[in-house]
Amino acid sequence: MTQDELKALVGQAALAHVVPGSIVGVGTGSTVNKFIDALAGIRDRIAGAVSSSQQSTARLEAHGIRVFDGNEVEHLPVYVDGADEIDHRGFMIKGGGAALTREKIVADLADRFVCIADASKLVGTLGAFALPVEIIASAQAQITRRFAALGGQATLRAGVLTDNGHPLLDVRGLSITDPLGLETEINQWPGVVSVGIFARHKARVCLLGTADGVRTLE
Ligand code: 5RP
């Protein structure tokens, strides 16, 4: 199976986690696009979606799925999103698609994070994928120095601003053995809007696309 087929497989499998009649939290990325396409098939059985990006909003609306603002809902039963890396504990690196801040905001509304990913995303230790960090531009140099002190090399993602209008750093060279601790520490640094470590908002279940079908990690 191709990577694209594996993404379609888990996108379809995630429908089993959607609560009928509810508003669904929807992430961002090529795997989530497959989920959105699958969701279109049951659009009459859901109330709508809260989206984590302009990209996902456009795709949802093109399928005739109503998109609610996050401020309109108090909680969501389920949030479905992809990951750049996920470990066996459900801790993730996210933000490869620059949507990390809104992804965390929507994940925070949800009772349950359902991660969908192809098998290449499963790792022993997070950090081989460069860690995305959304920042306030005037803090770039200081945040870069802070990462250097931790052994990380931060570079600006050229030509990219988030949906919130902020730049992003990608940090290479970190071996993230304590995702919860590092997320907490980076969140304290002035100028960090959000860090792409999802430890406090980890996946409760991961649907992993493998050559043998969907493997569920809980
Ligand atoms: C976007 C994300 C995505 O979930 C992550 O980049 C995975 O994307 P894809 O499904 O295209 O591999 O965090 O900010």
Image (tube, grey):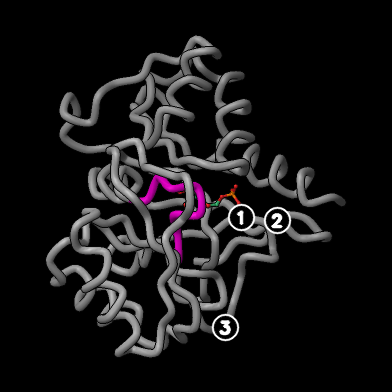
97 magenta-colored: yes
Label 2, secondary structure: give it.
strand
Q: Amino acid at mark 3?
A: Gly
Q: Position of residue 113 (x, y in %)?
A: 39, 52
Q: Are marks 3 and 2 in contact (CB under 8 Å)?
A: no
Tell me where residue 194 sits by quadrant.
bottom left
Question: What is the crowding at mark 1: few (fewer than 14 residues within 10 Å), some, or many (at least 20)?
Answer: many
| Lower position in the chain sequence, tag 1 or tag 3 | 1
State the residue position of label 3. Answer: 124
Q: Is residue 33 left or right of residue 49?
A: right
Label 3, secondary structure: give it.
loop
Q: Are marks 1 and 2 in contact (CB under 8 Å)?
A: yes
* Magenta region: 93-100
CB of mark 1 near ligand 1 (< 8 Å): yes
Label 1, secondary structure: give it.
strand
| Lower position in the chain sequence, tag 3 or tag 2 | 3
State the residue position of label 1. Answer: 117
Tell me where residue 85 sits by quadrant.
bottom right
Residue at 12% in and 66% down: 190
Q: Position of residue 174 (x, y in %)?
A: 45, 83
